[in-house]
Amino acid sequence: MEHKQDLGHKELRHKLTRDDVVVVQPSDGSGEPVRITTNSTTLEPVDEQDVSFFHDFIAGGVAGSASVVVGHPMDTLKVRMQTSKGNASIWSLATSYGGLPSLFRGMAAPLSTACVINAIIFSSYGWSSRMYDEHIGEEMQMLNAATPPAIHDSSVKAFTCGSFAGLVQALVICPQEHIKCRLQIQHGKGSPDHLYKGPLQAARSIVQLHGITGLYRGWCITCWREVPAFGAYFAFYDIFKDRINTFFANQELRQEQQQQQQRRNSDNSTTTTTTNNNNNMTLNLPGEIVSTSSLEDIPPAIAHHHHTWLSSALAGGTTGALTWAMVYPFDVIKTQIQTMPMMTDASERKISAVTRKLVAQYGWQRLFRGLTVTCLRAFPVNGIIFPVYEYTLMHVCALEY
C-alpha cells in the first residue's frame, strides 16, 4: 500500500508536481543524461504517521463496496460449483437457479457489510502496522543499527499485521458468509429448499432456532482460511507492487534515454545528475539527493504517477488470485459446513469429518473445485480494492491539510 511502501524511501517524501524534472546520468558515462519529467498531477505520498484509524476505515469501506459489485456473480457461481452433486456445466449452474439474475442473489448481505468488513480489515492492518513500528520495529532497529529506519523486515511486518487483520476479519465475516452461502444455494420460489426470503429473515430464523452461535457455524475453518491468507495477501502485495513499480521505472528510463540520445540540448534550468567517486548515480531531486548504484535500484517513487494505479491494480489482482489458490481447500470445507442442514449433528460438521467425506466421495480434486472461477473473480476484485483504497486514502488525508 502506498502509505506503507513509501516508508522505505523517506528521502523521496517531497511533492512531485507537473513541472518537476529528474535528470539521470548512467554511472558508466555512456549515453546522454536521461531527463525524467513527472508529467502527472500533483502527488504527495502518504506518510504512515499521517494515517489514522479513521483514514484507514473510510478508505477501506469505499474499496470494499466497489469490490462486491464486481465480484458477487462469480462468487455465487463458485458456491454453486462447490456444493453441486454432479459435474454440471458453468452455464447450467449460472442459469438453473432462476436465470442469470440469480447470480446476484444474496448480494444484499455482502454489500451491506462490505463497507464495514473492508474498513475493519484495512484499519486493523493500519493500526497493527503502527503498533509494530512503535514496539517491535524499534527493538529490531536497536539490534541492527545498520538497518535504515522503517525498512526493517517489511515482509515479516506485512505478514504479521495482515494475519492480525485476518483474525479480526473472521469475527465479522463468518456470520455474513454463512447467510450468503445459504441464500446462494437456494433454488427459485416454490422449491423445497427456498427457506429464506432475504439475509435479514435468514439471520432472524437462525438466531431464533440456534442462537447467536448458529450464525458462527464454520468459525474455526474461517479462521484457518483468513489468518494465513491475509498475512500472505499484504506481504505479497508489497513485494509485487515494488517489483512492478521498478519495472515501469526502468522501462521509462530506457525510453527517455533513447529519446535524449537524439537531442543534444538539455534544459540547463533543471536539476542535474552527477557521478560520485564510487560509480554510484546521485539523483539530485528538488531539494533532496538520492544515491543509487544502477537503474534497477532507482526507487519507484520517481516513476510517472500514472503507473501507480496500474501497478496497484496488477499487484492487487495477482496477489488476490495467488492467496486464494493457497487457501482454497479451506474455503471448500467452510462452504460445505455452512450449507449443511442446520440440524446436522456436531460430529458430522467437524473439519476432519467433512474433509474425509469429501475426499472419499469425490477424491482430492474436490477440494479444488471452483478454483478457476475463484481466481478469475479474485483478479478484478482485488485489482479494484487497492487502487480505490489508496486513491481514497490519499484524498481523505489531504482533506486535513
Image (cartoon, rainbow, N blue to C red):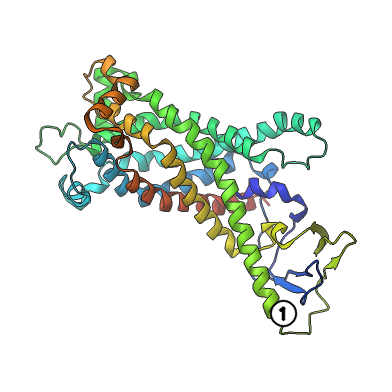
Above or below for 321 versus 253: above
Q: Residue furthest right?
A: 277
Residue tagged by mark 1?
A: 260
Q: Residues within 10 Å of mark 1 (few under 14, many from 20)?
A: some
Q: In the image, 295: left or right of 180?
A: right
Q: In this orientation, which residue lies closer to the viewer: 197 or 87?
A: 87
Percent position (x, y) of residue 196?
20, 33
Image-quadrant location for residue 374: top left
Give the residue at x 66% y 63%.
Answer: 303
Image-quadrant location for residue 249: bottom right
Above or below for 11 versus 136: below
Q: Is residue 296 visible?
A: yes
Give the residue at x 45% y 49%.
Answer: 382
Give the residue at x 55% y 35%.
Answer: 162
In the structure shown, which secondary structural element does the residue marked by tag 1 occupy?
helix
Percent position (x, y) of residue 265?
79, 84
Percent position (x, y) of residue 305?
62, 63
Above or below for 132 versus 104: above
Q: In the image, 287: left or right of 116?
A: right
Q: Is residue 212 visible?
A: no
Q: Count the marks: how many?
A: 1
Q: In this orientation, which residue lies closer to the viewer: 124 or 255?
A: 255
Give the residue at x 79% y 79%.
Answer: 267
Q: Given the image, on which type of amino acid does mark 1 rest?
A: Gln
Q: In this orientation, which residue lies closer to the viewer: 61 or 31?
A: 31
Percent position (x, y) of residue 229?
48, 36
